[in-house]
Image: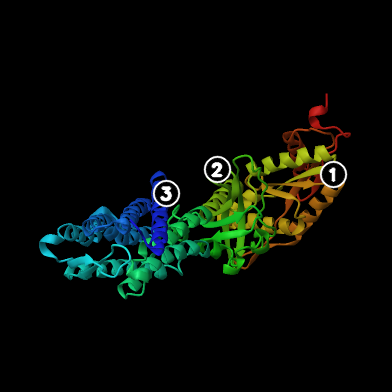
């Protein structure tokens, strides 16, 4: 069949369009689990291939009968492309509650009726009133007189395309810039055939040939490029955005250079410097942690699976927050390292409760200084450190003189007040490095790092004088208090703590037996009690 050269070129482009549609359909079939809308994309590209190949055969036909046959084949695919594109967009923007089969079937009622009208047109002429060969065409081509359903089909197709564009435009601002190229590709792939169809209806195309199959070659090529360059149709960005933004935990996405690529609103609440301007900046440049200095940092081996966890304290204004920071490698599908994610989990309530329980376990409830168990544990650590560094270490034991008489005469509430009075005096006199604990009922213990026996004795004497010269006032009545002290030091290495405290206790009882309100040092010819034979 002799054909005009323009039509021959047009047919080649249409065939290429069909081939690209087939390739896209094959890709969608093998990757249909990657994205919830992939089935819609697979059917759309498959039916686009049916439409374009049938149109190519229509152009190659020599008789009206052949042309009408291929037109019927075209309508097996063409009416369904627009609603399938709308369904794809709905999946893409996260409107998946409307894409369930029970709700989506309504989109295909008119396309099914259109196919039925075309196949049975000879009996009712509702789609085409007439179809005939164009008399002045260089090759057999047809003209039609549209029927009622032709306009119904055209209105539905245009409405579906406009709805798709509307959804893409509506969700444009809600989408991060990294996904906007994909949305622009989809919008272009929908609007280009729509404009081509409009120009065909208005008679603005060469030889009055439908340009849509040729334009679909451009959109298919654009889809292929976008799939392999931007990962199009691998995730629903709006659905991802909804999940990402609804997470209570802060999330940061970093590239291999530690530059911030993405973050959610929860992360921005934790780190005020996280604004849109922070995209592309290094993590250490925007990481601010209130009173806690320094930045979150980690080193990972790119060849191994990596996860790093750390807890941080933030102080914002007068409030304190605690976060568990978890960093993980972000891998490409081929296993190569693409970047890292940082998840910031708010553990403030848990940490405060844990600190409260630890406080209750370590601190004496009345005096708020260390209890005996904690004092012993921490003293062992200081003793081991002193032995390792060969530094002096001393202990002071003291108790309040005649404390039972205070309880019996004034009551236990005044006795408790006396304990607090003594503790406040000691806190004022002791160095911050000193370890201070309640050793018994009215007995207290002090561990003095880097302090020799004589110096510890001076500290004890200073506390004794301050207690004796500072009366306690209760109900406008002054009550004089005093305390007796015993002091010892670690003269040799690896002396058990219990031995040292026993020596201080011996010195304390010497103070008591000598009349109370005095300090005695434990001295035994430079040896300890457990070393005397």
Horizontal side, residue 270 vs residue 381: left or right: left
CA separation in Å, label 1 and label 3: 89 Å
Q: Residue 242, image x and y in percent?
A: 43, 60
Circle 1 is placed at which residue position?
Answer: 453
Whether residue 365 is visible to the viewer of this picture, yes or no, is no
- Circle 2: is it few (<14), some (14-19), or many (20+) Cα within 10 Å? few
The residue furthest right is 525
Q: Is residue 157 above or below residue 411?
A: below
Instruction: Indicate which disc, 3 or 2, sits on the residue closer to the N terminus.
Output: 3
Q: Residue 178, image x and y in percent?
A: 52, 62
Instruction: Indicate which disc, 1 or 3, sits on the residue closer to the N terminus.
Output: 3
Circle 2 is placed at which residue position?
Answer: 334
Circle 3 is placed at which residue position?
Answer: 23
Instruction: Indicate which disc, 2 or 1, sits on the residue closer to the N terminus.
Output: 2
Locate residue 102: give its quadrant.
bottom left
- Circle 3: is it few (<14), some (14-19), or many (20+) Cα within 10 Å? some
């Amino acid at each position: 069949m002799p054909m005009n050269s323009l039509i021959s070129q047009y047919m080649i482009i249409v065939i290429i369009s069909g081939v690209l549609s087939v390739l896209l359909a094959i890709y969608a079939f093998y990757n249909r689990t990657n994205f919830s809308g992939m089935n819609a994309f697979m059917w759309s590209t498959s039916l686009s291939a049916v439409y374009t190949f049938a149109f190519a055969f229509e152009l190659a036909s020599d008789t009206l009968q052949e042309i009408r046959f291929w037109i019927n084949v075209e309508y097996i695919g063409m009416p369904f492309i627009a609603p399938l594109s709308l369904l794809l967009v709905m999946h893409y923007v996260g409107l998946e509650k409307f894409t369930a089969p029970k709700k989506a079937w309504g989109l295909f009622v008119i396309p099914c009726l259109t196919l039925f009208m075309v196949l049975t047109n000879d009996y009712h002429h509702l789609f085409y009133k007439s179809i005939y060969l164009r008399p002045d065409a260089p090759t057999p081509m047809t003209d039609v007189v549209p029927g009622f359903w032709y306009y119904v089909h055209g209105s539905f197709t245009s409405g579906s395309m406009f709805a798709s564009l509307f959804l893409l435009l509506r969700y444009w601002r809600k989408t991060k810039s990294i996904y906007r190229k994909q949305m622009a590709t989809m919008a272009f792939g929908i609007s280009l055939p729509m404009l081509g169809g409009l120009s065909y209806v208005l008679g603005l195309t060469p030889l009055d040939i439908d340009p849509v199959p040729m334009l679909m070659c451009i959109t298919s090529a654009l889809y292929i490029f976008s799939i392999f360059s931007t990962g199009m149709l691998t995730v629903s960005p709006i659905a991802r955005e909804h999940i990402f933004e609804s997470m209570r935990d802060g999330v940061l996405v970093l590239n291999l250079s530690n530059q911030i690529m993405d973050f959610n609103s929860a992360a921005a609440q934790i780190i005020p410097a996280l604004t849109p301007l922070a995209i592309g900046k290094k993590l250490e440049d925007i990481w601010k942690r209130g009173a806690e200095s320094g930045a979150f940092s980690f080193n990972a081996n790119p060849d191994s699976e990596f996860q790093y966890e750390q807890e941080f304290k933030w102080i914002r204004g007068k409030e304190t927050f605690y976060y568990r920071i978890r960093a993980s490698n972000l891998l490409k599908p081929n296993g190569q390292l693409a970047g890292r994610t940082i998840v910031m989990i708010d553990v403030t309530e848990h940490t405060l409760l844990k600190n409260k329980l630890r406080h209750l376990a370590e601190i004496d409830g009345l005096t708020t200084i260390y209890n005996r168990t904690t004092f012993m544990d921490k003293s062992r650590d200081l003793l081991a450190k002193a032995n390792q560094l060969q530094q002096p270490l001393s202990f002071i034991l003291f108790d309040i003189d005649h404390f039972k008489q205070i309880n019996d005469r004034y009551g236990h509430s005044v006795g408790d007040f006396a304990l607090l009075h003594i503790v406040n005096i000691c806190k004022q006199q002791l160095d911050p490095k000193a370890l201070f604990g309640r050793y018994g009922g009215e007995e207290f213990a002090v561990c003095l790092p880097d302090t020799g026996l004589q110096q510890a004795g001076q500290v004890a004497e200073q506390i004794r004088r301050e207690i004796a010269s500072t009366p306690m006032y209760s109900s406008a009545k002054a009550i004089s208090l005093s305390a007796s002290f015993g002091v010892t030091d670690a003269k040799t290495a690896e002396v058990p703590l219990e031995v040292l405290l026993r020596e201080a206790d011996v010195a304390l009882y010497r103070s008591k037996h000598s009349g109370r309100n005095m300090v005695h040092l434990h001295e035994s010819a430079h040896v300890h009690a457990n070393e005397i034979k």
